[in-house]
Structure formats: structure tokens, C-alpha cells
Image: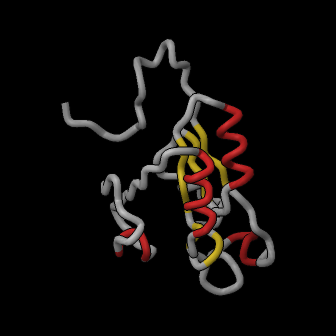
């Protein structure tokens, strides 16, 4: 987990995979959307909110292939091809399944989780904890 990562950091400017979660903090929704959409990669991103309208707006406006809504790691189930858009996709087709044939599509896989704020005991992002 790399929190408050600067956009000049190599961990931000290069697409890396592994047990790494980089967090860039922004002051507004519009600033965050611009940051994501202006980047050269478009693999995955997440938003955490109790505002369904903001979540719907985000999933429609963000330019990436995998989107998490209240889910920290938006990796879809196996029948969706792993991969994103922009420089995150190698070649002209995705990895496997029907996506290998539909190579001119730009689909989005949305993974979301909505809890009742009154009954779930605060924010729980689903990360394992040692108690």
C-alpha cells in the first residue's frame, strides 16, 4: 500500500502488477476523473462512496477497463477478460474467451458493493485484519 503517492513517482508512471495498491489523493471528483482519464494506462480504478449518483457518474465517465465501486481491487470474474484500455492492453484483442473475437470493443466490468451504513458498523473495505 502506497498512500499519497506523487504522480511523478515511478510506481505511478509505470504500470506495475503485484501486491501493490497506489493511492493518489485529489481534492474533487472532477480532479480525480481528469487524473485517471489523462493517464496513458487504463487497467483498473476504484471509487468509495455512499452516493449512488456519484458512483454511476464515475462508472460512465472514467476511461478504464475495470472499475471497483466500494471494492478495493476491481478484478472481474473469469468470464471477463483481464485487462484494461489504453496502453494497458497489449495487441488488438484481450486475453481469452469471447473477448478474443470481439477485439474492437471497449467494455467495462463494474464490481460494486453497497452496505447499509446504519448496520455495518462503519467503513469496512474488505481488507484482511490481524486482531
Give the side of residue 125 with respect to residue 70, left or right: left
Vertical arrangement, residue 69 with respect to residue 64, above or below: above
Q: Coloring scheme of the render?
A: secondary structure
Give the side of residue 128 with respect to residue 102, left or right: left
Q: Quadrant of the C terminus?
A: top left
Vertical arrangement, residue 81 with respect to residue 130, above or below: below
Please tell me which residue is depicted at 34% across the width and 71% down the height of the picture: 9
Please tell me which residue is depicted at 48% across the width and 50% down the height of the picture: 26
Vertical arrangement, residue 100 with respect to residue 70, above or below: below
Give residue 70's position: percent from left, percent from top: 53, 39
Front residue of 38/102: it is: 38
- Corner quadrant of residue 127: top left
Give residue 49's position: percent from left, percent from top: 55, 34
Q: Which residue sits furthest bottom?
A: 91
Vertical arrangement, residue 10 with respect to residue 90, above or below: above
- Corner quadrant of residue 76: bottom right
Give residue 28's position: percent from left, percent from top: 55, 44
- Corner quadrant of residue 44: bottom right
Q: Which residue sits furthest left?
A: 131
Give the side of residue 123 with respect to residue 49, left or right: left
Q: Count how many numbered circles sit on residues in the image.
A: 0
Please tell me which residue is depicted at 61% across the width and 54% down the height of the picture: 33
Give residue 15's position: percent from left, percent from top: 45, 74
Q: Quadrant of the N terminus?
A: bottom left
Amino acid at each position: 500500500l502506497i498512500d499519497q503517492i506523487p504522480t511523478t513517482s515511478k510506481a505511478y508512471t509505470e504500470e506495475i502488477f503485484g501486491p501493490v495498491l497506489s493511492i493518489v489523493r485529489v481534492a474533487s471528483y472532477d480532479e480525480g476523473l481528469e487524473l485517471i482519464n489523462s493517464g496513458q494506462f487504463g487497467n483498473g480504478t476504484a471509487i468509495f462512496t455512499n452516493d449512488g449518483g456519484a458512483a454511476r457518474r464515475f462508472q460512465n465517465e472514467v476511461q478504464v477497463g475495470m472499475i471497483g465501486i466500494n471494492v478495493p481491487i476491481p478484478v472481474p470474474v473469469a468470464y471477463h477478460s483481464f485487462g484494461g484500455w489504453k496502453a494497458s492492453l497489449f495487441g488488438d484483442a484481450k486475453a481469452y474467451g469471447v473477448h478474443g473475437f470481439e477485439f474492437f470493443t471497449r467494455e467495462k466490468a463494474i464490481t460494486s458493493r453497497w452496505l447499509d451504513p446504519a448496520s455495518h458498523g462503519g467503513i469496512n473495505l474488505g481488507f484482511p485484519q490481524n486482531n
